[in-house]
């Protein structure tokens, strides 16, 4: 069995990692750390894990060596400890934003401070298999993905890859998100009485995940914007991207591009039905699943394309992609441990 | 007292009209019709009205004359009966879409059939006081407003009126809506188990309310699109519009335009705070209120403006605007009967 | 105009008081205090009040005299300052639990500490008009009511008053509550991601409001229990009480008792329909309204009665009852300022 | 591989069965029938199954023989066709209520009509492994379980089995349920705008599942009542049962009884924590899981016990228990195909 440990296991990303790794056929979890819950059973924080494991949260200062180390801490911590983490494990997968960007200047522009370990940036591979599968199979260090970036990147990926977009026009990505995206800490606006029933456009421009879209899709910074709206849901992200296709691009070209993406990637599906209730991608049915559901609609008269991607922010947008990356790094079946189909209804 | 009757009182718009008119100081409700609930107390359908009125639903075929007649039927009925309704009352306010468009060709383009009473289209005034206050004060026939159109029109109105937009660029309006917009009839997708927790982009293009935006804002048809996303909420619409400002337009110009709109219109407010939980317009706190809350954010480097408008779809987006129009038609205080402030928290 | 001030205006009870008093025809609000939001506009905390008032939160240490002083602080503060508050106003209405119990021993039993101003307990009248209308009309000092106690007391009041219950059998009251009951401060369990979708029986026995039921209904302490379950809703309480009627009590006797209560009390309604969607009391449609909706069902074969009461915890369960008490104390119409009917749908 | 077919696969129970059987290592699904969706892909109705199966809904009239036949039709159909179903398969598991009761008189009392195949009642075993494990291992015909009955039965089972209750006192079971319990068909009260935000005690007495509690726990009919309250949730049931323990029964006796149940049964867990957010059983974290979480609280001074059980109504309360029964009937690992742990947060 491959041994793994998780640093920072009491947050939502850490809890979801625990669930996935406990169900993974090839791994054995050695340690899960949490300073604030030191000594507690992990099921006291993540109650779904009761009767699944007797693991307790341990002290991050006393970690032993393992084959794969997952970092699930809040953003900004891993970059200060990466040297010591690298001594603990030959393979590291970091869920936070510390090593997502390849360029230290881009990092400081979007995160407002210099990166603490810029030399490490080039050692990491961006952890989205749909973009970096071949590199991930050889990688030692893998970054996490931003959930909003992932929904945006996957919505647009088939269009970019097939070179269907007129990139002189700006791309507007409207993203709607559930409350788990805010993390287990929260703030006064995360209280149920204030957060229930919201449609709250809390960020019109400038969300940090924009940097990952610019880097990964290769679009010009001025040509893309992410607008974030919080809605009443716990898990889920829907990105609805507005862009312009090149002249003469037709719906059949889009079908071809999206179908190709779904064939090449086990966790991509195209959802574009003419009847029934679920005709477009919806995060509702993806809770706990690693799928990214893609959809599109083209106004052929204007060239306006609406591209959609729905994911579970804690799965394909975080812990699910991380496990998928581990599978690739270790040469295992890419879908191993990620078989949960999602629920209907929910 | 001015006498009023409502044709079609068992739907959500009719129920909200009933609530508002029961609380209005100047009117007396004579009759409320419903074929499907004939003879029932109105409070059996609208339970909030228990102990407020002993009115029962009556037969629309037996209506008597009144001063003001409200039509709250499903779309497509009023145009077939408008002559007979006009014999019952000198003033008619129709909440449905039958008389919103001035141009029969535009109507048939968006509604897919010829209008049954095209000669009447020019007799109606579009029922949005923020756009037609002076005409409404002299009007006999007033149309309702589409809730999504209203959120879009009011989000953009200050920008259009102050001529701040570069209209050669397309305007993308992303609209998020609650379930009451679907009406009291619903369909299989309206069932709670299917409709709860959704983020469902059910219409990428071509929503019928687009026609009202084109007409009322005077933008070119190819230059505006409305994209509709259903979220988990009962009452409320948020329109988030993306557009481009003219060169050299700055944030202070937008402040000026929005402030002017809020000063001129009793039900418009500008919400743009630097701190606190409620920094942007949110429909959550508008349930039952007639306010339209406006906000904006400008990226001065690109000229990309995000304009927002939050309303209660059953109030400012339907019955509230209808009562506001009645107040103007009758020469009463514009806010009469519309004083409810909304709730926090909710 | 009668002058009023509110100590502690930034919480949910204080915000709801502000809304009600701003709409009250006989009062003028002089000051609203908040230490944590000192100097901010009240609408920055309670966004529904934007464009309704330019009041700012003031310093509680600098209050001036008024006709009526409302105390909307967290529990446990008013009893330490009651002497100074009494010098500021001849009439005080306290929303907290400090002066709800008449007996200092009962207080210390349920609140786990000695009362700081026991001599004041007898000067206060319990602020539920349905139980103490005559006393309230002569009162100078009025306590608030616990929202869960109110739902329980009103569900059972008609049965107790008509002496229909066999009180040798225990009464089990099952209470389901929304999240606003937890107040604006909250805790880790109040976060949306943890609090959404819950059915959480957080207190099987021993909720402090039980003391108010024992005192006000005069039942034996061993004979009544309140069991609290949190559900996914912001505003609302439903109490479902299980008790046993005396031999030979029939459904018609219960009808008589409940109808009498609804006739005597302007804010009580009986909801017991044979058809339609809303056949029983439901807090859903009471948001913002001061009504308490009562219902019942009797199994005549066993004598088991299920008595129900639905309220808005921030209205009839807190600020609404407080304003109703003010109306009685001042000799005004009991319903003044409390006319909002509630919404359907919501 | 063992072959299975499902009659009635388009409802919620059928969809959940499909998900579980697709993931089961020992079975192959031959056919899934649906008259209303004949010829459609199953993923068009159950969108979580997209990319999992290319099965289409087939005609129930043309079914071929299989090893195990699941019946997931609406109540009242299976009893009219049981002879023909028995010719198709040696083993039948019926999810509906047709064969849950052993006594035709009890059936007609609670269902208001004579049973159509009374001779078959004694051939079926009630499908709750926690009550009938040994019989199920030898059974050919297994009934489904009512979800509310299951939550009630499991909440009380440890108390009944250890003979801790004073059964001369009535047992009141307060049950809170999500909307999926109403099935995929629904009614006007199931519409999102009417069903969202509810706390609706829709049945004070007389719910049909009561009959299953009487039969399975062996309590006297007059001694138990189920009171049903709908709350805003899609999946989940919480039963909170109030009963009286025998003299001198203490909390430690209850611990012993509940712990024993959890040790003997792989899907029972005891949840009774002193700290953290999840201290009691909650259906929220059980969506998709087959666990039944049990809890209790005893007032030793009065003998009043509050016993709780949380389940996912579509899993342990329907399809999950059905698959668990199949595992027992076939001699497989009882937990096979039921490994999903549930999600946190959700």
Image: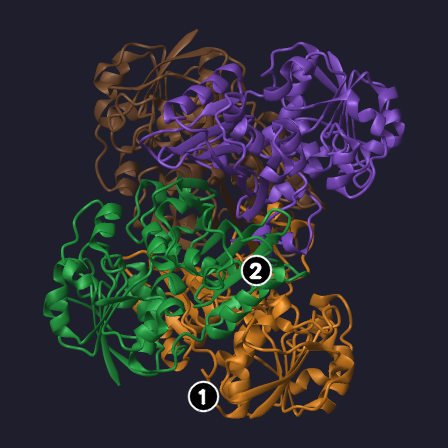
Chain colours: A green, B purple, C brown, D orange
Q: Is residue A225 left or right of residue B68?
A: left
Rendering coords of residue D291 (x, y %) = 44, 72
Asked if badges 2 and 1 are on one and the same chain, I answer yes
Residue A73 horizontal side relative to residue D344, left or right = left
The residue carrying mark 1 is D333
User: Which element is circle 1 on?
Assistant: loop
Name the chain letter of the residue that bears numbered label 2. Answer: D
Residue at the limit of the structure toward the front, as seen here: A247
Name the foreground residue: B36 vs B101. B101
CB of mark 2 within 8 Å of CB of mark 1? Answer: no
Q: Who's the residue at 25% across and 21% down the image?
A: C82
Is residue C218 shown to the viewer in this render?
A: no
Residue at screen point 62% across, 59% down? A251
Left or right relative to B179: residue A216: left
- Work out whether C71 lies above or below A55: above
**Which quarter of the rendering shows the C terminus of chain D?**
bottom left
Which x, y percent locates residue A46? 32, 64
Q: Position of residue B48 (x, y in %)?
A: 62, 34
Query: Can you identify the residue that label 2 sits on?
Result: D226
Q: Tell me the crowding category of disc 1: few under 14, some 14 to 19, or many 20 or more residues within 10 angstroms, Cα based.
A: few
Instruction: Please tell me which residue lies in front, D64 or D172.
Output: D64
Question: Callout 2 environment at 10 Å: few (<14), some (14 to 19), or many (20+)?
Answer: many
Measure how far apart labels 2 and 1 are at the Cα level. Answer: 33 Å
Choose mark 2 or mark 1, whichever is in front. 1
Q: Quadrant of residue B323?
A: top right
Picture quarter containing residue D87? bottom right
Whichever of labels 2 and 1 marks the residue nearer the N terminus, that label is 2
């Amino acid at each position: 069995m491959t041994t793994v440990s998780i640093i920072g296991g009491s947050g939502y990303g850490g809890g979801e990692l625990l669930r996935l790794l406990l169900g993974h056929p090839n791994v054995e979890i050695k340690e899960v750390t949490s300073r604030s819950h030191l000594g507690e059973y992990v099921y006291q924080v993540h109650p779904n894990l009761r009767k699944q494991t007797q693991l307790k949260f341990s002290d991050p200062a006393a970690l032993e060596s393992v084959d794969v180390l997952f970092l699930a801490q809040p953003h900004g911590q891993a970059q200060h400890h990466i040297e010591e983490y690298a001594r603990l494990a030959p393979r590291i997968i970091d869920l936070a934003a510390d090593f997502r960007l390849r360029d230290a200047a881009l990092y400081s522009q979007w995160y407002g401070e210099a990166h603490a370990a810029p030399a490490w940036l080039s050692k990491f591979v961006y952890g989205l298999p749909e973009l970096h599968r071949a590199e991930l199979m050889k990688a030692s260090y893998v970054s996490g993905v931003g959930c909003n970036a992932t929904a945006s990147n996957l919505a647009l990926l088939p269009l970019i890859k097939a070179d269907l977009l007129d990139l002189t026009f700006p791309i507007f990505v409207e993203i709607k998100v559930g409350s788990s995206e805010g993390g287990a800490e929260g703030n006064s606006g995360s209280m149920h009485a204030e957060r229930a029933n919201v449609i709250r456009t809390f960020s019109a421009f400038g969300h940090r995940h924009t940097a990952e879209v610019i880097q990964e899709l290769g679009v010009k910074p001025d040509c893309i914007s992410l607008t974030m709206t919080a809605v009443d849901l716990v898990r889920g992200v829907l990105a609805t991207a507005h862009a312009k296709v090149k002249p003469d691009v037709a719906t059949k070209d889009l079908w071809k591009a999206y179908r190709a993406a779904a064939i090449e990637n086990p966790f991509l599906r195209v959802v574009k039905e003419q009847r029934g209730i679920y005709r477009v991608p919806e995060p509702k049915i993806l809770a706990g699943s690693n799928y990214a559901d893609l959809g599109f609609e083209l106004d052929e008269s204007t060239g306006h394309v609406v591209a959609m991607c729905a994911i579970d922010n804690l799965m394909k947008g975080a812990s699910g992609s991380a496990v998928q990356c581990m599978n690739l790094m270790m040469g295992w079946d890419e879908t191993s441990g990620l078989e949960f189909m999602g629920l209907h209804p929910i």
